[in-house]
């Protein structure tokens, strides 16, 4: 299931996976659509390229986004041959696409981390227009990660804790008792969909899996659960607190085996779907229809275990409820502010 797309086909398949082309479109329709998209792209690009210095001086939001893009582009994947070296023209392509996206979606504009999402797409497409529209499709899937109020990230972290509390309740309880029940240490994983955790080739394969929503929506959250399950004994036996947990999680970068993690995540999914009593909150997270027979008021009292899965969703009284936390920079690693502090990237 998780072999990914053949590398020779990726250039075409990604355009469908990311919504550039409709699946049912004909070759003629795709040619016409691409011609239209080329024109639309360069119209938007001209909007910012034709902006005068005097206009920029009166447009603070634009200046801030332009400056942030310039800084991020210069430090994005510079070890990859496609972006390596001084005066690399591909860096200009990366910058131009991000600047054009600002004009495409000025409400969102640019937030740190977005250059990491674009990089593999541009490496594959090489073509500026194709890369832009595939990036648009990717951002449509994850734009809530970059919301001003960070509601999307808070929801995912809460859902992650819910899944962990069902599948690995002992670890969930441990984290909550060690000031880590907010799951902030997983922030980077979710923000850029594991971009910094896997190699260039592995992240392309993983993203392909996630874009399909197979075997379920929010499969990336089950990936998180699978990784945490693998690291459970290290975290608990060493009595790690939040700072140590955060450091350990960050140090896993490029040391996580993709195949075994995908297999474990799939196994967790099948265990959940096979459970005889699964709370509706969990069912909704993994795309199952709610049964309406387990209300949130009674989930804690009716926790049971089926096929090795602990079925409580709220069995841990969370001291670090997301609603109660003032979200801000944490040890220089995680931030929930509009200008995200992503120095850990």
Image (cartoon, rainbow, N blue to C red):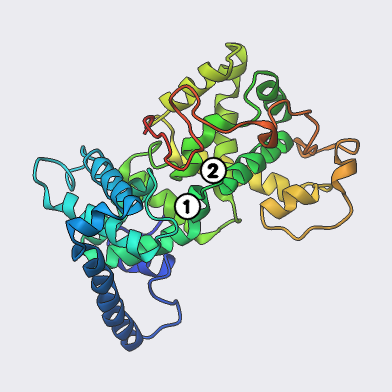
Is the residue under label 1 in contact with that under label 2 (CB below 8 Å)? Answer: yes
Say which quarter of the image contains residue 130: bottom left
Q: Position of residue 126 (x, y in %)?
A: 21, 60
Instruction: Indicate left or right for 280 with 116 as reference.
Output: right
Per the rendering, the mark at residue 263 is 2
How packed is label 1: few (under 14 Cα within 10 Å), some, or many (20 or more)?
A: some
Give me the residue at 25% from left, 78% from top: 39
Element class at badge 1: loop
Q: Is residue 118 visible?
A: yes
Element class at badge 2: helix
Of residues 149 and 259, the one nearer the viewer is 149
Q: Where is residue 268 in the image (x, y as percent from the top left)?
A: 64, 42
Q: Is residue 237 above or below residue 37?
A: above
Q: In this view, does 34 lie above or below 56?
A: below
Work out which residue is located at the far top of the displayed protein and give it.
Answer: 238
Give me the residue at 21% from left, 39% from top: 78
Residue identifier under label 1: 2
Give me the residue at 53% from left, 53% from top: 144
């Amino acid at each position: 299931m998780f072999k990914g797309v053949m590398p020779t086909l990726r250039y075409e398949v990604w355009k469908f996976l990311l919504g550039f082309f409709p699946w049912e479109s004909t070759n003629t329709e795709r040619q016409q659509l691409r011609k239209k998209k080329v024109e639309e792209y360069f119209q938007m690009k001209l909007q910012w390229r034709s902006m005068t210095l005097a206009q920029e001086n009166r447009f603070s939001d634009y200046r801030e986004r332009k400056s942030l893009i310039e800084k991020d582009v210069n430090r994005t994947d510079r070890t990859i041959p496609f972006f390596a070296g001084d005066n690399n023209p591909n860096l200009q392509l990366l910058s131009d696409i991000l600047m054009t996206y600002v004009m495409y979606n000025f409400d969102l504009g640019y937030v740190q981390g977005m250059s990491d999402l674009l990089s593999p797409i541009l490496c594959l497409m090489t073509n500026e227009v194709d890369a832009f529209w595939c990036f648009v499709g990717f951002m449509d899937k994850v734009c809530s990660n970059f919301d001003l109020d960070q509601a999307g990230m808070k929801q995912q972290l809460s859902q992650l804790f819910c899944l962990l509390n069902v599948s690995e309740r002992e670890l969930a309880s441990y984290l909550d008792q060690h000031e880590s029940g907010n799951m902030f240490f997983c922030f980077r994983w979710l923000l850029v969909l594991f971009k910094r955790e896997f190699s260039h080739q592995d992240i392309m394969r993983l993203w392909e899996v996630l874009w399909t929503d197979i075997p379920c929506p929010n499969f990336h959250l089950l990936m998180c659960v699978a990784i945490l399950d693998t690291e459970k004994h290290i975290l608990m036996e060493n009595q790690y607190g939040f700072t140590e947990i955060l450091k350990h999680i960050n140090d896993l970068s490029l040391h996580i085996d993709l195949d075994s993690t995908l297999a474990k995540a799939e196994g967790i999914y099948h265990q959940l779907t096979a459970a005889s009593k699964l709370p509706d909150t969990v069912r909704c997270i993994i795309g199952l229809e709610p049964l309406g027979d387990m209300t949130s008021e009674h989930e804690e009292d009716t926790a049971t275990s089926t096929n090795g899965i602990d079925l409580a969703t709220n069995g841990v009284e969370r001291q670090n409820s997301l609603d109660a936390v003032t979200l801000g920079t944490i040890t220089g690693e995680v931030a929930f502010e509009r200008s995200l502090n992503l120095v850990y990237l």
